[in-house]
């Protein structure tokens, strides 16, 4: 099964080709240009590099949010257009879930050093910068399922938006402790690293990497279970209303 996956939830974004259980290629986008300017050219480029066309793709995958409203809309519209044209099904994946899986998998790599069976993170907190001193957040408990199996991450605090302080308050209630087995990841975790260190001094922060590969692997797992959808059924995961809507309501 060959999957083309796209993430436009951040300014850079990324694209990836996943084949069976491996990431063939993953590329970060050119953040100096908008997604509208770069797509679908970046997708064509990664396919060309491997002698592929859109018709060679079995399933298309997209990060459906949260993140940039404009980016999410462009990413979904791009994947919908390609899927309709090629007659393929799609899988939509939460960017927060992809971040959590990627962080967990990175800590399972051999170069991370020897670890006991229960030394890995039990809690993964994915934070994306939501501006206005807020973060998009989701908290996951790591299960014994294989890496990039959707069952590996059990959401104990689903996707929401809030201040780092408020979410850290809730995390202490959820986990019951400031545990060394807690890992934070995402650009929001890097941005608010000092606040995390002040409240969870033993927690580890894993810098984010392009997530399109993780989106593709999660999509593969779901597609193998028959969990694909029609392109028209993709639902964006906005979490928060657009600034333009909030501003308009304030004027009314």
Image (cartoon, rainbow, N blue to C red):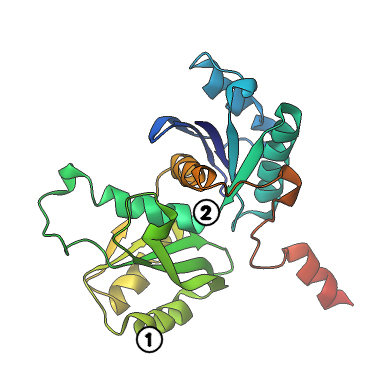
Taking the image as drawn, is residue 151 in sight? yes
Outermost residue, right side? 252
Image quarter where the C terminus lies is bottom right
Badge 2: few (under 14), some or many (20 or more) residues near its Cα, within 10 Å? many
Rounded to the nearest whole Å, what is the CA distance between mark 2 and mark 1?
A: 24 Å
Outermost residue, top side? 51
Residue at label 1?
173
Q: In the figure, residue 122 lies in which quadrant? A: bottom left
Q: Is residue 241 left or right of residue 56?
A: right
Q: Count all numbered tags in the image, as a single digit.
A: 2
The residue positioned 65% from the left and 39% from the top of the image is: 89
Q: Position of residue 4 (x, y in %)?
A: 55, 33
Residue at label 2?
95
Secondary structure under tag 1 reads: helix
- Residue 145 vertical placement versus 139 (above, below): above
Q: Is residue 8 left or right of residue 24?
A: right
Instruction: Give whichever of discs 2 and 1 has the lower sequence position.
Output: 2
Q: Position of residue 238 (x, y in %)?
A: 66, 61
């Amino acid at each position: 099964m060959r999957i083309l996956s796209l993430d436009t939830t951040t300014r850079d974004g990324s694209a990836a080709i996943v084949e069976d259980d491996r990431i063939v290629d993953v590329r970060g986008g050119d953040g100096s240009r908008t997604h509208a300017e770069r797509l679908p050219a970046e997708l064509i480029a990664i396919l060309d590099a491997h002698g592929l066309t859109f018709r060679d793709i079995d399933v298309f995958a997209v990060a459906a949010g949260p993140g940039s409203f404009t980016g999410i809309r462009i990413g979904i519209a791009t994947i919908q257009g390609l899927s309709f044209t090629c007659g393929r099904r799609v899988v939509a994946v939460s960017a927060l879930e992809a971040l959590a899986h990627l962080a967990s998998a990175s800590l399972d790599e051999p170069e991370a050093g020897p670890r006991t069976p229960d030394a890995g993170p039990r809690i993964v907190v994915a934070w994306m910068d939501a501006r206005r001193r807020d973060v998009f957040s989701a908290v996951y408990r790591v299960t014994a399922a294989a890496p990039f199996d959707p069952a590996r991450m059990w959401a104990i605090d689903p996707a929401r938006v809030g201040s780092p302080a408020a979410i850290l308050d809730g995390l202490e209630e959820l986990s019951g402790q400031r545990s060394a087995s807690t890992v934070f990841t995402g650009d929001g975790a890097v941005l608010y690293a000092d606040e995390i260190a002040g409240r969870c001094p033993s927690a580890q922060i894993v810098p984010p990497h392009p997530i399109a590969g993780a989106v593709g692997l999660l999509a593969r797992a779901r597609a193998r279970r028959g969990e694909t959808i029609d392109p028209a059924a993709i639902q964006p995961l906005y979490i928060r209303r657009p600034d333009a809507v909030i501003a308009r309501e304030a004027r009314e």
